[in-house]
C-alpha cells in the first residue's frame, strides 16, 4: 500500500516540504477496536466466492464455500465478518459423504466476527463451510465500495474493493489475518456491458439473463485475504507485455492515453524486478486499476495481479499534470509492483512486521526510480525520506519499527512514517553495510525460502547472515528495528598526523523533547571521509576510533546512507562550511538537514544553519535551493500571527530566494534538468507563501490572462498557480473556482478543484469550504480532504468544526483512517488550547488507539518550544545579517 498523498498540503502547493519541517506525522481513523487473532481450531485452504453486486442499492449477495481443516474437536467455528447478514450457514464433510449440518450464527460487531455453533462436536478433518449472506457496498474505500464520478456522458458509478488491513471481512466471511493464506475462486454476476477485473484472468463467461453475465476468474495462487481484488465499471483496458507476462492498465472509458506512461513504466519495472529478485513474477497477468476519488489512508494498493491506484497517482493529464506528478506515478507503480514479491509472494506473519512489506517496497521503489530515471536525480530525495522519519522518531511518542499490534485500529495506525520511511532508510543503511550484491542475494534466498508463506523479520536477517561475510547484520538490524529512536554520532576529535586523520566518535541519542534522556545504544555502521579522500567505515558501539586518509575537513555519514545524526565540534563544522561547495550534493543536503535539526533541538546554535543557507552559492544544485526554500517557508510558519517579526523575516527570505527564481525564470528551457523544473514550482510556491508581492501579482496576472492568452498558464504550472490563487482568493475568485469545480467533467481535475476551495486564507471562505464539505456536492471521498485542507491554515476552526459535526464527518472518513484523522486537524496549531482539546478527544477513545493523538500533541509542544526558545536567535541573526 502507498500512503495517501491527498492531504499533504505542502505537496498540493508543490512547495518543498523542506524535509526538516515536514508536517506532523500521519493522518488519523477507525472507531473499530476489534481485538485481533481468531481461535486456531480451524484453518481455511480454499474459498469459492460468488458475488452479485447491486450497485444501485449499495448492497450485494454473497455465497462463499470455504474448504476448511478442522484441527481439533470443535463445536464452534469463529471467523471474521463485518457489515453482513447471514441467511444460511452449513458445514459438510469434504468427502461428500455425510449430510450437511446447519449452524447457529452469532455475529459480534465489536470483534468483527461471526461464530457458528453446531449441536454435535465436529471431528478433526476436512469440511466445506457454505455461507449465504448479504453485504454492504460502502462509499469510502473499505471493503466493497462505490465511486461516483462525472463523465462527458453523465454520472457513472464504479465498484472496487480495498481490504488492507482488515476489510476483506466486509466482502467475504473469512479468516482475515495475513497468515491464513488460501486459494480463491471468484465468480461475479454483473452487467454484461461493464468490465469486471480481479487478481487473475477471466476463466469463463456465461450469459446470466436480464443483461447480466456470470464471470469466473481463474484460481489465485495461495495468498492472504487482504490481497483479493474485485473491480467493476465502464472501463477500458490497455495492455503490453514484459518477460511473457501480460501487463494491463484499467481505467474509466476513454482515458487510455493518460495511462500510457504507467503502462510503459510497468513494462520496464517488471523486467527489472524479475532480474533483481531472481524469481519470475508468478501470475499470468498484472493489472493496475485506476479509480477516481481518494482516501485519507492510501493512494494505491498492491492486490496481487490487480494493483489498485487512485487516478491522481496513476493518470497523467497533459493539460494539468506536472513533472512531480509523473515522478509520483512512477514511484507509486514501482512501490506496488515491489509488493508483488515483498508482501504478496512472501507476507509478514502479522501486522507487527508490517515494515517488511512497506519499508521494503518503499526502498525498492526508490532504488528502481534511480535506475530507470537517473535524470530525475531522486537519490537526493532519500535525505528527505530519512529526515521525515527522524523527525517523528526523535520524540517520545515514537515506536520501534517492529511493534506489538493487538487491534484492527493499531494495525491501521502501523501504516505510518516509521514503518515506511524509517523502514526504507534502515534498509538503505543495511544494504550499504553488507554491499548491494550480497544484499540482493540475501533477498533472493529469503523470497525463495518463503514463497507463498509468511515470515517474521528474523527470517530476513537469517537469510542475510548467510551472505554477509561474517558482518553482524542481525545485531545491527535488531538495534535499529526493535528499539525506537535516532542515534547521534558525536565527532569528539579529528587529529591529523602524517597525512592521516584519526577520528574519535561516540554514540549518543538525538532527541527533540527529552534532552536529559539516558541514550539508547546501537551498533551504528558509520562511513566517513576526509573530504575528497577515500572513505572508511566502522561499526560504532558506544565509541570508536576511525583512521582516514588525508587531512582536512572531515565528513561523517559520507554518502548519507546512515540512519543517524552527526554532531560536529564548532571548528569541524566551520571547516565543512568553508568547503561546502566541494561536498557532493547529497552530503550538502545531509549536512544542512543535521545542522537544521540540531539547531532547532538546541544542540548547536540556530545560526549555523542560517549561515549555511545564506552562503549557498548561486550555482548550487536546484535540490539544495529547494531545501533552502523549504526551510525558509517552514521557519516562516513559526512567525504566524506576529506580523512585525514575520515581515522582517520575510524581507530577508524573499531577498534570498528572488535572485534564484530570476535565474530559473517562468519559462522552461528545453534542455533544463528535471530538478530545475521542480525548483521553478517550488520557488513560485515559496515566494508566494512568503508574501512576495511581485510574485503574487504575476501569478494573479497569469490566472486572469488565461482566457485570452493560452500561454499565460503553462500546463506544468497550472496546479501551483491555481493553488496560490485559491489561497489568496476573495469571494469572487472563490465563487469562480467553485463554479469551475461544479462544471468540470474530469473527476481527477474536479477532485482537485474542490480541494483548492479549502486553501483560502480568508476565514469566511474557509468556513464556506467547511460547510460545503458536509454536503453531497464535492463527492463522497473529497470532503475529509477539504476539512483537512482548511486545517492547514486554520487548525482551530477545522478542528472545532469537525468535532461539532463528528457524526457526519465520521461517515466521510474511511474507517482505516479513523483514530488519526481528528487529531491531525489540529497539527499545525501553536495554541495550548488545542492540546487541551485533543486531550479531551483522546479521553473518548480507547487507550490502545491514542498514539497518533499523543504524537500530534508532542509535535505542537515542540513547535511551541521552537517558537519560544529558537526564534529569538533567528531574530538576532537577522538583525546582524540584514534582516
Ligand atoms: Zn506499500
Image: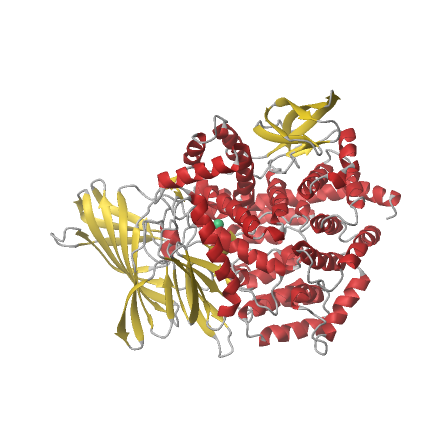
Question: At 54% across and 46% down in the image, what residue appears?
Answer: 367
Viewed as shown, does residue 46 lie left or right of 280? Answer: left
Task: Find residue 186 and report its image quarter.
Answer: bottom left
Tell me where residue 668 appears, x and y as whole percent.
71, 63
Question: At 78% across and 33% down in the image, what residue appears?
Answer: 575
Question: At 42% across and 50% down in the image, what residue appears?
Answer: 340
Q: Is residue 533 above or below residue 771?
A: above
Residue 402 visible in the current orientation? no
Residue 602 visible in the current orientation? yes
Viewed as shown, does residue 276 lie left or right of 99? Answer: right
174 or 16, nearer to the observer: 16
Q: How many marks do you count on the picture?
A: 0
Task: Find residue 184 and report its image quarter.
Answer: bottom left
505 or 804, nearer to the observer: 505
Tell me where residue 828 appears, x and y as whole percent.
66, 51
Q: Is residue 331 above or below residue 189?
A: above
Tell me where residue 147 appears, x and y as whole percent.
46, 67
Amino acid at each position: 500500500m502507498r500512503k495517501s498523498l491527498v492531504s499533504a498540503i505542502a505537496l498540493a502547493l508543490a512547495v518543498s516540504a523542506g524535509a526538516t519541517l515536514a508536517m506532523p506525522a500521519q493522518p488519523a481513523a477507525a472507531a473499530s477496536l476489534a481485538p485481533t487473532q481468531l481461535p486456531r481450531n480451524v484453518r481455511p485452504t480454499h474459498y469459492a466466492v460468488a458475488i452479485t453486486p447491486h450497485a444501485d442499492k449499495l448492497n450485494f449477495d454473497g455465497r462463499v464455500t470455504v474448504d476448511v481443516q478442522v484441527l481439533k474437536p470443535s463445536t464452534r467455528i469463529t471467523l471474521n465478518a463485518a457489515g453482513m447478514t447471514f441467511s444460511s450457514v452449513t458445514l459438510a464433510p469434504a468427502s461428500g459423504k455425510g449430510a450437511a449440518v446447519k449452524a447457529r450464527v452469532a455475529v459480534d460487531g465489536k470483534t468483527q466476527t461471526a461464530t457458528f455453533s453446531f449441536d454435535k462436536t465436529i471431528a478433526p478433518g476436512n469440511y466445506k463451510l457454505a455461507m449465504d449472506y448479504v453485504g454492504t457496498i460502502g462509499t469510502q474505500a473499505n471493503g466493497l465500495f462505490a465511486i461516483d464520478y462525472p463523465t462527458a456522458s453523465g454520472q457513472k458509478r464504479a465498484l472496487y474493493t480495498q481490504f488492507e488491513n482488515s476489510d476483506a471481512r466486509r466482502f467475504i466471511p473469512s479468516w482475515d489475518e495475513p497468515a491464513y493464506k488460501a486459494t480463491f475462486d471468484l465468480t461475479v454476476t454483473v452487467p454484461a456491458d461493464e468490465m469486471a477485473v480481479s487478481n487473475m484472468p477471466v476463466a469463463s463467461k456465461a450469459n446470466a439473463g436480464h443483461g447480466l453475465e456470470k464471470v469466473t476468474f481463474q484460481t489465485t495462487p495461495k495468498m492472504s485475504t487482504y490481497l483479493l481484488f474485485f473491480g467493476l465499471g465502464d472501463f477500458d483496458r490497455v495492455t503490453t507485455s514484459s518477460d511473457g507476462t501480460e501487463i494491463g492498465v484499467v481505467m474509466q472509458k476513454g482515458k487510455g492515453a493518460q495511462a500510457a506512461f504507467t503502462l510503459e513504466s510497468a513494462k520496464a519495472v517488471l523486467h527489472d524486478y524479475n532480474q533483481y529478485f531472481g524469481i519470475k513474477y508468478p501470475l499470468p497477468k498484472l493489472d493496475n486499476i485506476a479509480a477516481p476519488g481518494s482516501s485519507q489512508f492510501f493512494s494505491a494498493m498492491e492486490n496481487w495481479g490487480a494493483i489498485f491506484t487512485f487516478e491522481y497517482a496513476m493518470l497523467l493529464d497533459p493539460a494539468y499534470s506536472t513533472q512531480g506528478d509523473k515522478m509520483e506515478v512512477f514511484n507509486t507503480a514501482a512501490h506496488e509492483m515491489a509488493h508483488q514479491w515483498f508482501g504478496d509472494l512472501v507476507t509478514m506473519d502479522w501486522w507487527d512486521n508490517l515494515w517488511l512489506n512497506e519499508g521494503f517496497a518503499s526502498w525498492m521503489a526508490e532504488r528502481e526510480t534511480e535506475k530507470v530515471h537517473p535524470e530525475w536525480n531522486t537519490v537526493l530525495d532519500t535525505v528527505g525520506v530519512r529526515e521525515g522519519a527522524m523527525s517523528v522518531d526523535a520524540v517520545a511518542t515514537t515506536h520501534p519499527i517492529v511493534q506489538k499490534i493487538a487491534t484492527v485500529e493499531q494495525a491501521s495506525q502501523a501504516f505510518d512514517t516509521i514503518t515506511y520511511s524509517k523502514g526504507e532508510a534502515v534498509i538503505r543503511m543495511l544494504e550499504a553495510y553488507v554491499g548491494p550484491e550480497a544484499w540482493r542475494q540475501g533477498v533472493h534466498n529469503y523470497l525463495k525460502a518463503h514463497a507463498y508463506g509468511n515470515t517474521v523479520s528474523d527470517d530476513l536477517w537469517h537469510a542475510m547472515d548467510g551472505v554477509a561475510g561474517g558482518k553482524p547484520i542481525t545485531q545491527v538490524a535488531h538495534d535499529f528495528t526493535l528499539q525506537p529512536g535516532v542515534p547521534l554520532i558525536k565527532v569528539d576529535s579529528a587529529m591529523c598526523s602524517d597525512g592521516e586523520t584519526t577520528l574519535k566518535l561516540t554514540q549518543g541519542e538525538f532527541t527533540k523533547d527529552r534532552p536529559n534522556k539516558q541514550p539508547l545504544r546501537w551498533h551504528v555502521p558509520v562511513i566517513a571521509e576526509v573530504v575528497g579522500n577515500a572513505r572508511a567505515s566502522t561499526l560504532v558501539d558506544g565509541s570508536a576510533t576511525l583512521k582516514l586518509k588525508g587531512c582536512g575537513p572531515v565528513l561523517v555519514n559520507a554518502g548519507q546512507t546512515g540512519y543517524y545524526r552527526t554532531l560536529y565540534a564548532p571548528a569541524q563544522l566551520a571547516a565543512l562550511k568553508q568547503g561546502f561547495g566541494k561536498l557532493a550534493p547529497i552530503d550538502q543536503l545531509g549536512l544542512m538537514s543535521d545542522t537544521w535539526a540540531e539547531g532547532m533541538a538546541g544542540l548547536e546554535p540556530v545560526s549555523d544553519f542560517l549561515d549555511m543557507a545564506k552562503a549557498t552559492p548561486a550555482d548550487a544544485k536546484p535540490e539544495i535551493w529547494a531545501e533552502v526554500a523549504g526551510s525558509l517557508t517552514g521557519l516562516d510558519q513559526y512567525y504566524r500571527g506576529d506580523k512585525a517579526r514575520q515581515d522582517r523575516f520575510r524581507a530577508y527570505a524573499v531577498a534570498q530566494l528572488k535572485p534564484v527564481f530570476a535565474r530559473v525564470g517562468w519559462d522552461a528551457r528545453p534542455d533544463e534538468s528535471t530538478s530545475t523544473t521542480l525548483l521553478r514550482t517550488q520557488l513560485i510556491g515559496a515566494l508566494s507563501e512568503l508574501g512576495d508581492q511581485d510574485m503574487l501579482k504575476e501569478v494573479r496576472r497569469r490566472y486572469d490572462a488565461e482566457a485570452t492568452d493560452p500561454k499565460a498558464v503553462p500546463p506544468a504550472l497550472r496546479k501551483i498557480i491555481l493553488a496560490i490563487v485559491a489561497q489568496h482568493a476573495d469571494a469572487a475568485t472563490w465563487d469562480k473556482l467553485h463554479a469551475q469545480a461544479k462544471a468540470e467533467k474530469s473527476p481527477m481535475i474536479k477532485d482537485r478543484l474542490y480541494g483548492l476551495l479549502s486553501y483560502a486564507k480568508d476565514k469566511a471562505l474557509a468556513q464556506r469550504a467547511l460547510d460545503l464539505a458536509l454536503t453531497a456536492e464535492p463527492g463522497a471521498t473529497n470532503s475529509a480532504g477539504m476539512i483537512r485542507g482548511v486545517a492547514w491554515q486554520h487548525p482551530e476552526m477545522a478542528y472545532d468544526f469537525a468535532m461539532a459535526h463528528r457524526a457526519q464527518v465520521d461517515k466521510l472518513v474511511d474507517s482505516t483512517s479513523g483514530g488519526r484523522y481528528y487529531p491531525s486537524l489540529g497539527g499545525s496549531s501553536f495554541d495550548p488550547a488545542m492540546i487541551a482539546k485533543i486531550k479531551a478527544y483522546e479521553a473518548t477513545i480507547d487507550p490502545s488507539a491514542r498514539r497518533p493523538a499523543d504524537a500530534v500533541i508532542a509535535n505542537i509542544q515542540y513547535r511551541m518550544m521552537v517558537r519560544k526558545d529558537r526564534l529569538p536567535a533567528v531574530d538576532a541573526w537577522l538583525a546582524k545579517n540584514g534582516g
